[in-house]
Amino acid sequence: MKALILAGGKGTRLRPITHTSAKQLVPIANKPVLFYGLESIAESGIKEIAVIVGDTRQEIMSAVGDGSKWGVKVAYIEQEAPLGLAHAVKISEDFIAGDKFVMYLGDNLIKEGITSIVSEFEKNKPNAQILLARVKNPQQFGVAELQGGKVVKLQEKPKKPKSDLALVGVYLFDKNIFKAVNGIKPSARGELEITDAIQYLIDNGYTVHPHVVQGWWKDTGKLEDMLEANCIVLDTKEKDIKGSVDGDSTIEGKVIIEKGASIVKSSVRGPAIIGRNVKITNSYIGPYSSIYHDTVIENSEIEHSIILENSNIKDIKRIEDSLIGQNVTIIKTQKKPAAYRIMVGDSSKVEII
């Protein structure tokens, strides 16, 4: 059995972060989202993986490499444009070479992993198996309608959903999916939809099994989902102090401090993670915060936020519910006259109180 990981797409819902960085590499609890999927696939016993890449191909390839760090072999398939999930399957036919495979969207997190799901697929041998989760806003997802425990209808972002069962970003297929992706036409938005391909299987008498996810699942495509995923993962961690903490600092709860990090005259309240070589001085880091590597924080308060690498935050009263990108400097200036002086990129959002 093989696997496809989709790591193309433009990540428009996470701009401006994704103007300069792949959305699949934004860290959750200081680990890129994409790595959680790679770990789940490797743990299921799958050894051959193809990563579908687009505009951010160089960044993805640099981060993932040949897959040896996970004990797998990784190849790369370039998708010239985001033409749909079914299109990504279509261009992978040579790699799959008639085998069964898992398709995993690279910005998804599934608590239970996929080992039991792969075993279920291997045991029952349907032509396709889809993962479903109950959601409050099904009109924003692909939605499945079930009858007698079988999938009878799929709709992509319906205005009037027939159920609250949304498609999770993990699918399992046998070789018949290639008949489907070659037998459908682009949707109104110009993409080959995976929902249309699976519906093709249903309409042509193939077997499609549903698997309703019982644990948590997150699509990390939006800021609020990214922050929630960060909270969920941090809650699963245990205290681990490898960096230095001076006598004037306090560490409370489940806090991870990685090698080379230093905490000086500061308070860190978990769950939180402080990355390698981070310097925190005279500051407060509150629950559900992830501070990525090589960041400097002085005289500031941060809570329920994700701060990416090489950032510099100084003399800021409080930051919360925020995602701060790489190489960002946020400082309080003493210049007069007093005024906000802001330089931000396209599609940014700034809230001032």
Image (spheres, grey):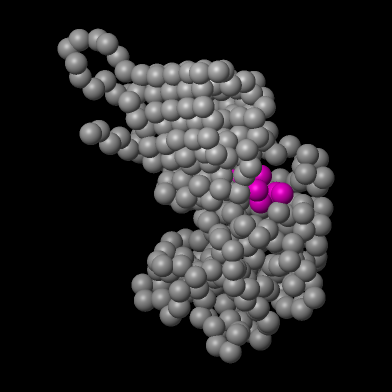
Relative placement, left or right, of 47 versus 88 is right
| Residue 151 in sight in this render | yes
Does 291 appear above or below 172?
A: above
Quarter of the figure that contains the N terminus? bottom right
Relative placement, left or right, of 12 versus 208 is left
The residue lying at 64 percent from left, 24 percent from top is: 243
Front-lying residue, 318 or 330 = 318
Q: Could you tell me residue 97's position as x and y percent?
A: 80, 62
The residue lying at 39 percent from left, 28 percent from top is: 301
Q: Quadrant of residue 59?
A: top right
The magenta region covers: 33-39
**In the current view of this chain or complex, which residue is farthest to the top?**
335
Q: Could you tell me residue 299's position as x and y percent?
A: 40, 19
**In the current view of this chain or complex, which residue is farthest to the left?**
337
The residue lying at 27 percent from left, 11 percent from top is: 334
Does 244 appear above or below 210?
A: above
Q: Is residue 226 magenta?
A: no
Front-lying residue, 231 or 173 = 231
Front-lying residue, 231 or 286 = 286
| Residue 289 in sight in this render | no
Quarter of the figure that contains the C terminus? top left
Q: Could you tell me residue 345's position as x and y percent?
A: 37, 30
Q: Could you tell me residue 210's position as x and y percent?
A: 62, 76
**In the current view of this chain or complex, which residue is farthest to the bottom?**
148
The residue lying at 80 percent from left, 75 percent from top is: 123
Q: Is residue 37 magenta?
A: yes
Report the label total. Answer: 0
By secondary structure, the bulk of the magenta-drawn segment is best described as: helix
